[in-house]
Image (cartoon, rainbow, N blue to C red):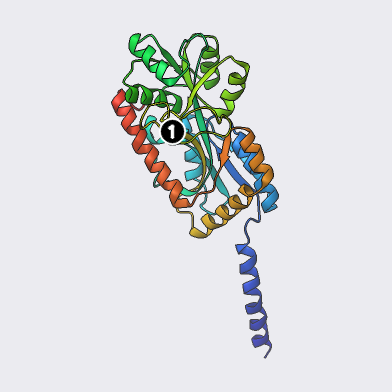
Amino acid sequence: MRIGLLLLLIAGCVPAASAQGDAWPNRPLRFIVGPGPDVVARIFGEKLTEELGQQVVVDQRPGGGGVVAVEATVRAAPDGYTLLNTTGSIVIGVGLFTKSSYDLTRDLTPVALILTVSNVLVVNPSLSAKTVGELIQYARGNPGKLNFASGGTGTAGHLTGELLKSLAKIEMTHVPYKSLAQATTDVLGGHAQLMFLITQTAVPHIASGRLRALAVSSAKRTPALPELPTMIESGVAGFEYSSWNGVHLPPRASSQAVTRVHAALEKVLARADLRERVLSMGMEPVISSPAALGDIVKSDLAKWRGVMQAAGIRPE
């Protein structure tokens, strides 16, 4: 009798213990960030902390064009407590430019696309071109005299410049810098004539008159610069590129972990305060399915691999 009663008591405790163990999150989460600014991860980390009731700690892992951040994610437990802030730049850096052994379509688990960011083709005002058409005309009449700046060989700024050269059939000289900040400084100073800049960085310089905007690289116009045409509208057929931010989990993350993190991101992206903040910075909030983010990674890899091959750019 006593043994039977004891067994019943133990059995009654098991579901409760199991339910407690399944609670998520019951400890702090880690949000890994690769090279570049960590502002997106900090904005989302703050709002996720408020929504989940657990601290979301931003863990910046620069280096290797994103390899260090991806490696830290791959080695983490696939339990929904480690998130990676993926970007188009990380896809280029890890998937194409560095001699990395990681396959981003296999070694990371996609959760959602969360932001898209237009890039702006800007020129130093000393250049006579006021439209993309005039820029192309100038380049054809002065082959090799235009210099375009980027934050380094193999970066998104480099490859978008190469894409423009290819599609417009013009010659320009690439000038790589150690950082995007240095590249921007030299375009402002007229040492290089043009570059592609993310919208939130470009807008203050455009407003001050220190840079002239010719077009946005995205498929549609950006709310931050609604009067500015797209590259396609400007006559460069097939030219489309948007920077983006997404969230991935480690490999072999369960569908339950993906669903939980996706639901949390969806709640955060529905918040008016977050939407207003990112829109004011020139970024557009979105929430995609895991499969859609996976497709974006595959599409970017194929697109930029072709650009690199055409330009003769090899992994380092």
For disc 1, the marked residue is: 241
Classify mark 1: residues with Cα within 10 Å, few (<14), some (14-19) or many (20+).
Answer: some
Could you tell me residue 131's position as x and y percent? 45, 19
Residue displayed at 62% across by 73% down: 15
Single out the residue that lies furthest toward the bottom. 1
Could you tell me residue 187's position as x and y percent? 51, 14
**Is 77 placed above or below 123 here?**
below
In this rendered view, identify the residue nearer to me: 50 or 283.
Answer: 283
In this rendered view, identify the residue nearer to me: 91 or 70.
Answer: 91
Residue displayed at 33% across by 17% down: 170
Residue displayed at 64% across by 69% down: 17
Could you tell me residue 228's position as x and y percent? 52, 27
Question: The residue under label 1 is which amino acid type?
Answer: Tyr
Q: Is residue 24 left or right of residue 94?
A: right
Q: Is residue 303 left or right of residue 257?
A: left
In this rendered view, identify the residue nearer to me: 131 or 284.
Answer: 131
Could you tell me residue 300's position as x and y percent? 39, 38
Quarter of the image where one finds residue 20: bottom right
Q: Is residue 22 left or right of residue 64?
A: right
The total of numbered circles placed on residues is 1
